[in-house]
Amino acid sequence: MIAADLARRIAEQGPISVADYMAAANAHYYATRDPLGAAGDFTTAPEISQMFGELVGAWLADLWLRAAPAGPVHYVELGPGRGTLAADALRVLAKAGLAPEIHLVETSPALRAAQARAVPAARWHDGVDALPTDGPLLIVANEFFDALPVEHCIRTPEGWHDRLVDRAETGFAPVLGRRNVENRVPTALRAAPVGSLFEASPASAAIVRALAAYLARQGGAMLVIDYGHATSAVGETLQAVRRHAPAPVFDNPGEHDLTAHVDFEALAGAATGVTVHGPVEQGPWLTALGLDLRAAALAKADPSRVAEIQIARDRLADPKQMGKLFKVMAFIAPDWPEPEGFR
Ligand code: SAH
């Protein structure tokens, strides 16, 4: 399977980069299963409660109505999972009389099938190269960038070197490469002590660069929600997750989710021609958009669900749960209005 393929590739070419290992492992992982939910490997905000996608929808509707663009508008979601967020957000847009075309960027056949059930009107794309060019894009990415490959850069006495993945007795193991990768490390971090590790995600930067160019040309906005850090920092965050618990990163590639914290400063730095807002923490952002009002309305509509709704509200917004670790960043096209929730 994927482990045998990787082992053969390393035997033929030598050790591969951490990013190549992560890309191959995650491509196999997502292509072959629906990993979401209590019975799967991890749970995401839209799967916790409809309130999450509804508030994202309200945020988009507010921007759209204030910008009042003429002509078609496109909803674009990156890595939409089961399509739950899209369905919840599009329902709120529809209530405001807004009906965008729907474009989902997804590589996994298993998840495309789930998305087709949730959002039958969608069209699918393998990447961001061929999105529509005839109108503003409203782009949403929840827990997408953390799944994209990272490179590991290690500070040695001889400067910054890349970390590679080699074969080991059982499975795989990281080894130090010889290539100098100082140009991947932000200037402010280059003097970090020997042994420091910096994670760079050129794949994430390339996607943000491409999407910012669409926004600068056509109008629109991009909302990125993920766990990560507001400023670039050294430290290893790459981890494997299986059945809601950590697993060894270099064992069983393709059988557990590989994920790394998102470097929001690096994402912001990759965008040109747009205004960047945030990151702000998910808890205060959802609260500013009316999370508690929405929870109260849902509880009033079905009093038997009061406790469940309160638990979901706390999972999304409590600083000890998702409220603080998860961050929200907005990229706004020139001449588009100031987005809600970032003051
Ligand atoms: N946004 C969803 C799912 C998050 S899981 C949620 O919040 O529930 C990550 C998603 O990104 C999955 O849909 C996965 O198949 C997709 N994905 C991962 N790598 C991708 C890539 N390189 N290109 C497109 N989609 C990718």
Image (tube, helix red, strand yellow):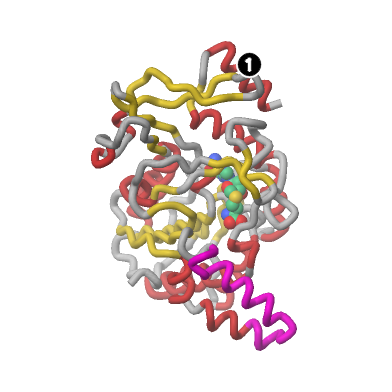
Task: Say whether residue 23 is visible.
Answer: yes
Rendering coords of residue 308 (x, y %):
68, 75
Instruction: Classify 206 as above or below 219.
Output: above
Q: Main secondary structure of the magenta part?
A: helix
- Up-down relation of residue 32 to residue 342 (above or below): above
For this view, does 170 lie left or right of residue 10? right
Q: Which residue is mark 1?
A: 8
Q: Is residue 325 magenta?
A: no
Highlighted range, magenta: 298-321
The image position of residue 97, as x and y in percent, is 54, 76
Residue drawn at (72%, 49%), measured in percent from left and top? 113
In x, y percent, where is residue 292? 53, 80
From the viewer's perspective, is residue 71 above or below residue 171?
below
Q: Name the residue: 38% across, 18% down.
A: 178
- Identified by mark 1, the residue type is Arg
Q: Position of residue 211 (x, y in %)?
A: 41, 49
The answer to which image quadrant residue 39 occupies is bottom right
- Furthest residue toward top: 12
